[in-house]
Amino acid sequence: MNDFKPGLEGVVAVETEIAEPDREGGILRYRGVDIEELVGHYPYENVWGLLVDDDLDSVMPEPEPHVPAGLTGNAPADLQAETARLGGEWRLGKLNEISDDQAREDLGRLSSQMMGIVARSARVADGKSDEVPANVVAQGETAAEKFLLQWRGEADPNAVKAIDTYWICTAEHGLNASTFTARVVASTGADCGAALSSAVGALSGPLHGGAPAYVKPMLEEVSAMGDPEKWVSDTLDSGKRIMGFGHRVYRAEDPRSRILKRTARELGSPQIEVAEELEEAALTELERRHPERPLKTNVEFYSALVLDVAQIPPPLAPAMFACSRVAGWSAHILEQKRTGRLFRPSARYVGPAPRSLSTR
Ligand code: COA
């Protein structure tokens, strides 16, 4: 029986009520609501409430006062370490020993704190050793505005809009690698800090959350060369992947890419033209080389432009993605707690046949 599925592609491992991309339809719905109806109408913190509590009037809580232990300025690493540490510092209970309400409270506290950790880590990366005073941060109206205030002490409205849109578009996306990780860890009964910090680690790789960090340098190379078709051919001929294209699930247009492209235009991204030229060249060549497999623009390509409007340095991109995905992860950790079962897939052994060490 050939039941081996590398990467578990197509294997249904959970049933979820949170969200699942519509593979052919190019629509993404959170708890049944098209994200087109959320962007620009509700801030990210309400979308967090929609995903976690199925209630748009519920919001991610305000962060409580907390001083991170030792930030290095490497935001994904800081976020992973600090989130795990909070589990100990706050004495969070094990998921199999606490109530659903307690788990929801733990996830709210952690989610808002995680945004603060990323903002402070980014401030350290900027070479600033001081903290922005709490009363300055408190002046922000939305989570995105508070994030920027905590990082830079000021919040440009275009940057706020860019981050809010990006966070909403990337808040949840079914059973991707990091969400699966969060659910696997939650399924063991670990605390919410352990589940969320593990998810951050899974997100930090370039094949999942790190792609925007590669898109900006790619656009700079294409601009310098002035020939997108040649750049695409050269890149593919050398066996490299074009970051921001292809998706495990979507066979149609990625709806998030459509919204982010529109936002990049509206916010006057200086790279929109070169991005569109590269997109056209990449789609044509990828289709020619892989007629059997649709390789379309994914969320990460135009995310890079939107994040650039907010002057987010490329290395910070995975941590920005983690800030948004805390909503999806939290919703899945709760769902796993309520309905899930310990994950334990099987491996087929293909190693050496039994052999005795006495013949050495
Ligand atoms: N550029 C060039 N070729 C690509 C490609 C890309 N972005 N994405 C997939 N391919 C090619 C692979 O080389 C492979 O070709 P081969 O069969 O000749 O070896 C084929 O398409 C299938 O690739 P595979 O890795 O099996 O597809 P997948 O569905 O598992 O991969 C991604 C999904 C996202 C990991 C993949 O498309 C990718 O690496 N994209 C670039 C990174 C990225 O944008 N990540 C963000 C995802 S939201």
Image (cartoon, rainbow, N blue to C red):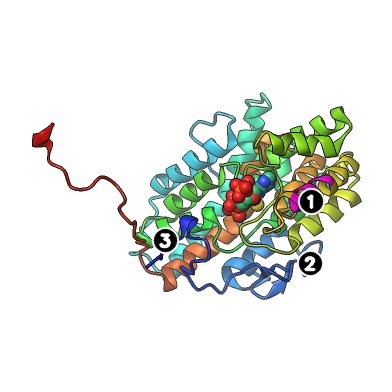
* Nearer-the-camera pick, 269 or 152: 269
Disc 2 from disc 1: Cα separation: 24 Å
Main secondary structure along the magenta-highlighted residues? helix
Q: Determine if the magenta segment contains residue 313.
A: no
| Lower position in the chain sequence, tag 2 or tag 3 | 3
Task: Please give the residue where the numbered disc 2 appears in the rendered image.
Answer: 36
**Whether residue 100 is visible:** yes
Disc 2 from disc 3: Cα separation: 37 Å
Residue 283: assigned label: 1
Secondary structure beneath label 1: helix
Task: Provide residue 299's location: percent of width, then percent of height.
Answer: 72, 53
Q: Which residues are magenta?
A: 281-288
Residue type marked 1: Leu
Q: Determine if the magenta segment contains residue 283.
A: yes
Disc 3 from disc 1: Cα separation: 31 Å
Task: Please give the residue where the numbered disc 3 appears in the rendered image.
Answer: 4
Secondary structure beneath label 2: helix
CA neighbours of label 2 inside 10 A, class few (<14), some (14 to 19), many (20+)? some
Q: Name the residue rendered at 49%, 55% in the picture.
A: 7
Q: Name the residue rendered at 51%, 47% in the picture.
A: 202
Eye-nearest disc, 2 or 3: 3
